[in-house]
Amino acid sequence: MVNLTDNRVSIVIPCYNEEAVIAESIRRLLCVCEGGGLVNVELIFVDDGSRDRTRELLRGFADKDSRIKVIGFARNFGHQIAVTAGIDAARGDAVVLIDADLQDPPEVILEMIEKWREGYDVVYGTRTERPGESAFKLATARGFYRVLNKLSDIPIPLDTGDFRLLSRAVADVLRAMPERDRFLRGMVSWVGFRQIALPYKRAERYAGESKYPLRKMLPFAIDGILSFSTKPLQVSIGLGMISATIALIGIVYAIALRLFTNIWVEGWTALMIAVLFLGGAQLLSVGIVGEYIGRIYNEMKQRPMYVADEYIGFTKKEPTFSRTSERMVP
């Protein structure tokens, strides 16, 4: 058993429409805390604008247990922003990130804490098995991490999610990073410090449905690639050079036909292929540049990263850093 009487542990749990699983999630987390000797612990649930009874249920649990705290967003801001809000509010010497769906077993938290006690600043879970997920999702996830590592300027561990433990030092560095298009697992890799993988078997979702369908996975993957690599811009430059080369060959070919033959109209097929290729390459390049410009635009607006309309369980003795204001949480 780990003795943590002198250390405070914060567990951050983002939630979105999790009424079917929230009670079991709290029960499992509290069992782990009590069975593992986590005396000074806080469970910070971040309700990401749920449309079901998630907030109502969390409010009831927080009223009964002072260890449970709730941050309620005014609308849905997204998983990565919800995790960020939890890190902002956490006051623990160690901060654990875990989803509410119980696919990441809460019992692994104790193993992460053991590694932290050995001196590691980041302990990230590596999935050895992912039961209950389709072959398509497994293949795309595997491919995404490998493509990301090829493009990224920093190595990002393969087959990992946001399930991890952060030391206070790492959490403070993340709080100081103001970017809005956030890819936290990449940001944690960028920070550095002593990091170690912890293999674990992922479980099937306890209840409800996945909050990351394909339409959300694609923007998330784009955020991951564009946040940690400028190589897509280099790809657009390469496409431009290839297009220019093909265009030059076409010009030489057209001039040669005009000067040395009597055939001036032939070559329509080659012309159409060249036009379509050039047009496609240009549109792709403009799209890549536009994605980067769009991120610059979002950063320049300086809007709050999130808006919380409710803080439950926090006291004035615990001022919570908030990207929405400098005030102390009521």
Image: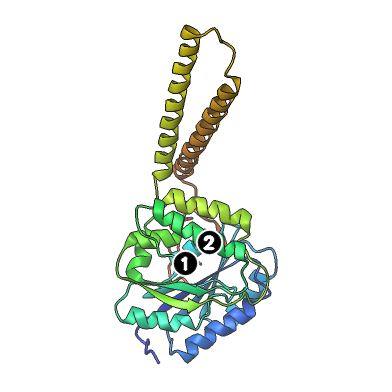
Q: Tell me if mark 2 has few (under 14), some (14-19) or many (20+) residues whose alpha carbon lies within 10 angstroms of its own.
A: some
Precedes in sequence: disc 1 or disc 2 = 2
Quarter-of-image position of residue 318: bottom left
Q: Marks 2 and 1: in contact by CB < 8 Å?
A: yes
State the image coordinates of residue 228 (x, y, percent, origin top left): 40, 51
Name the one closer to the observer, 203 or 137.
137
Q: Is residue 222 visible?
A: yes
State the image coordinates of residue 263 (x, y, percent, origin top left): 56, 10
Q: Could you tell whether 158 is left or right of 195 in the image?
A: right
The kind of secondary structure element at disc 2 is: helix
For badge 1, the amino acid type reads Asp
> Is 191 located above or below residue 279 in the figure?
below
> Is 165 located above or below residue 173 in the figure?
below
Looking at the rendered structure, the number of numbered marks drawn on it comes to 2
Image point 45% across, 48% down: which residue? 226
Mark 1 → mark 2, Cα distance in angstroms:
8 Å
For badge 2, the amino acid type reads Ala
Image point 35% across, 64% down: which residue? 172
Q: Which residue is mark 1?
A: 159
> Is 181 located above or below residue 185 in the figure?
above
Q: Tell me if mark 1 has few (under 14), some (14-19) or many (20+) residues whose alpha carbon lies within 10 angstroms of its own.
A: some
Q: Is residue 320 visible?
A: no
State the image coordinates of residue 237 (x, y, percent, origin top left): 41, 35
Quarter-of-image position of residue 117: bottom left
Name the one closer to the observer, 104 or 6.
104
Q: Which mark is residue 141?
A: 2
Q: Could you tell whether 56 is left or right of 113 in the image?
A: right
Quarter-of-image position of residue 213: bottom right
Name the one closer to the observer, 293 or 304.
293
Furthest-front residue in this view: 261
Q: Which mark is residue 30?
A: none
